[in-house]
Amino acid sequence: MWQLEGKDFFTRELDEALLKREIDLVIHSYKDLGGERPQGIELAAVTKRVNPADTLITTKETALKLVNQQFKGKFRLGSSSPRRIAQSKALPEYLPQSGLEIENINLRGNVDTRLKKLLSGEYDAIILAAAGLERISYSEKGYEALKELAPSLTFMFLPLQDFVPAPAQGALAIDCHEENSELKTILKTVEDEETRNCVSHEKATFQNYGGGCHLPMGIYAHSLDQGIHLVEKGETQSGKSIHKSQILEADKLKKIESFLKGGSKIFLGMPAPSPHKQFIYDALIEKKFQTSKASKANVSLVSTRHSLENFSKYCKATELPVVFAAGSKSMKSIAKAGYWCHGCANSQGEQTLQDLKNSQSFGLFHKLSGEWNVFTHKDSKSSLGNVVPSYIRVLNEVEPTWEQNLEKCEAYLFTSFAQYKEYIKKYPYIKNKPILSGMGKTYREFKKQGVECLAVPSFRWVLDQVKENHE
């Protein structure tokens, strides 16, 4: 439909019925609504957004071929979205067989039709919106159809950093006639202000690029305590590639942005991937593999690549264990080790995976409820299930020049509260500088312990600010 002239294909007849007062309200998938709405129609409520991610669906047979390095030919990917096609370039890094060439093939039909086409062998995998697949299961007919098809299939939630969703994906919009004051008052009871605010930024940014179904652009905004994080990825109408993130409505984080763009030294609490004069990486703490036994569980979470060795002793890739990663980086490590990884927590922390445990639709693919095994540090805690100690922290001797550079840093980004505690023991002056963390469990622990901390969207956001400055 993106190739056709005109607009509002999904909504026109419903809009006409609403304006004629033949119906009282319309519930839309918000991503289907155009930027310009007919006069007389009012967006009365935006409901709380559910999982905004895109999901890769394939057969368990294909996944097994990939983990056994036996897949032959091009990987035929079904999608009718220019955005998904453009972003599919990032997919090979998340698949267990290296060197795959993606071939995008047009895909049509409703959800069960698309799944049947996948099962018939027309495609090697297809991409669907996680929210759409979940909502299909809310009806008895949709649930039964999915229940029949899902046992032969598996899924992968695609990381939001590389597979940026369509504006408003996962949110519902409720329209009514602008003169229907009584109904507008009632609908406000299902309004989620946070979702509306984020989606408004997404829609406005999309319109700035020209909008329309043909534009291969993903835009996603989510809330921080200190503002809004907006991610944009795709191609403009002129063919220019875009992949950037920015912070909106956040005065405190603007200060961090100014440090980064001004060339100030920043501590990044991770091992150095490569030297960079502006960043001081963690040379003090080294993570070392630890062996421990795991109890039987249907699902595993691998917190970092350091936990992977212990996990691999417990789960074999060829048995297609259900495994998730903490972030996109560890998800790539799991794929590189030859496993099919079902997704990651993204920037929202364990809550994303906690919500998944209760999923009605994805629970038909694999049993997700019950206690999970969480492969992480022995002192970690998890709301998902049993902690399986998989690495220890060892303190290294460090060079005096490294310590001198550490003291010159304007801000310190820690990957865990335990890391922060080790550093302030040895370098107490750090307490007087801005402390940063990601948005998930680490940030919540800082708040719980009463330590002032700013949540940044991701390590990538930090790196993007420096990259943008140099460009």
Image (tube, rainbow, N blue to C red):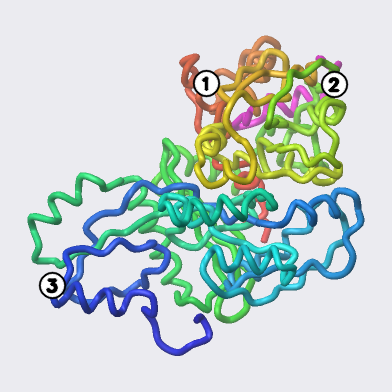
Q: Which residue is mark 2?
A: 288
Q: Are marks 2 and 3 in contact (CB under 8 Å)?
A: no
Q: Nearer the viewer, residue 132 or 363?
A: 363
Q: Residues within 10 Å of mark 1 (few under 14, many from 20)?
A: many
Label total for image: 3
Say which residue appears at 47% left-offset and 17% top-offset: 448
Residue at mark 3 to residue at mark 1: CA–CA distance: 53 Å
Q: Earlier in the sequence, mark 1 or mark 2?
A: 2
With respect to residue 344, does 444 lie above or below? above
Mark nearer the viewer, 1 or 2: 2
Say which residue appears at 55% left-offset and 54% top-offset: 146
Residue at mark 2 to residue at mark 3: CA–CA distance: 67 Å
Element marked by disc 1: helix
**Amino acid type, callout 1:** Phe
Q: Earlier in the sequence, mark 3 or mark 1?
A: 3
**Amino acid type, callout 3:** Arg
